[in-house]
Amino acid sequence: MNIYILAEYPFALRLNGKTVAKKTRYCELTAGKDTLLEVLPLNFSPARAFALSEDFFSETDENTVKVRMEKGAFIKLKNPRAYMPYRMLFQKRLAGALATAYTDGVYKFALETQTDYLLTTFDAEIVDAGEFYAGNRSFIYARAADDRLACFHADGKIECVFDSFADSFGFDGGFYTERIFRDAAAHRTKTFWNTDKIPFTAAKSEVVCGAERVYPDILLPYLLAEALLAGDDPSRYLSGKAKENAHALLPYFGNFCGVFPPPKREGDLYPRILYKIKEGLYRTKTLKCTFAGGKIENLTLV
């Protein structure tokens, strides 16, 4: 199988005891089933050793992201989380609750009332917290540096009512979030949320994209997948029966989270559709298309 190893630190690599890289951050290699890989970080991080078995690609590992493809896999090695001693970031009284942001091993956001307490952890620093009113109820929000946005209701029992990522948010006309997609069509979405339900549910979404352009056939599958991710109508990239059945594409693709081109070693140009199995563990499907007149006339996920 083809193995692609990417690390956040320089490393040396041994394959079945033989050194194949002395100092690199990225390595491509061909390995057989149960091949033993030894990753030797050059930044004093702990060494890693693993066999390339199916069990390895079906189990989560701390500080490792695994993406299983048909002919191989990506392995991303992350720096171990740096220890963070206790440090107060800020403390506020919001919507009847005491809100405290602090570090204690990880970033933490605590909400406390006279009758309840809720602790939420974040991967990135908590940079802001505030309150807003919607539907005659008050809510608390916490925002992190990685654009994660969490909202809470603290009337009696403290509950998390929203937890997602947003490039921006606001309250004009109701609570809404905006996302900017870094894709070919420059999609932007604005979603208004129904705050009467816990957790919040999407009430309506508005999708806009950049100016229409003529794209080569090879890019059309990527544009199609990116349109589905952004909640846009993909029919502009389709023709014939594929266009007639555009409404069925999202259920057909399922709950995917990304699209990317395969490395040259894979030997084809078909896009890989990314599916999250659990935190740090992903698999892919291959999107194969045929074209006619600058449109996709047929497509298959394998």
Image (cartoon, helix red, strand yellow):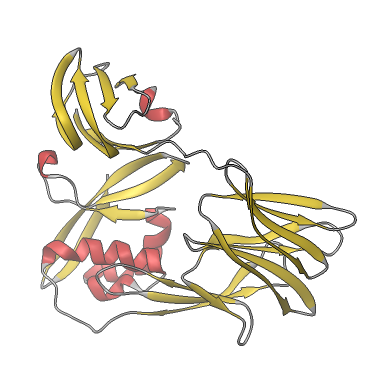
The percent coordinates of residue 18 (x first, y second) are 15, 15
- Total numbered badges shown on the rendered structure: 0
Name the residue: 12% across, 72% down: 294
Residue found at the far right of this picture: 114
The percent coordinates of residue 160 (x first, y second) are 69, 58
The quarter of the rendered structure image containing the C terminus is top left
- Given residues 233 and 131, the one toward you in this image is 131
The quarter of the rendered structure image containing the N terminus is top left
Task: Left or right? Give the position of 267 relative to 211.
Answer: left
- Above or below, 111 relative to 297: above
Name the residue: 22% across, 83% down: 212
- Above or below, 217 relative to 36: below
- Given residues 255 and 103, the one toward you in this image is 103
Residue found at the far top of this picture: 17
Task: Left or right? Give the position of 144 relative to 274.
Answer: right
Name the residue: 49% across, 63% down: 147
Q: Is residue 200 visible?
A: yes
- Given residues 224 and 199, the one toward you in this image is 199
Name the residue: 20% across, 52% down: 261
Q: Image quarter for residue 14?
A: top left
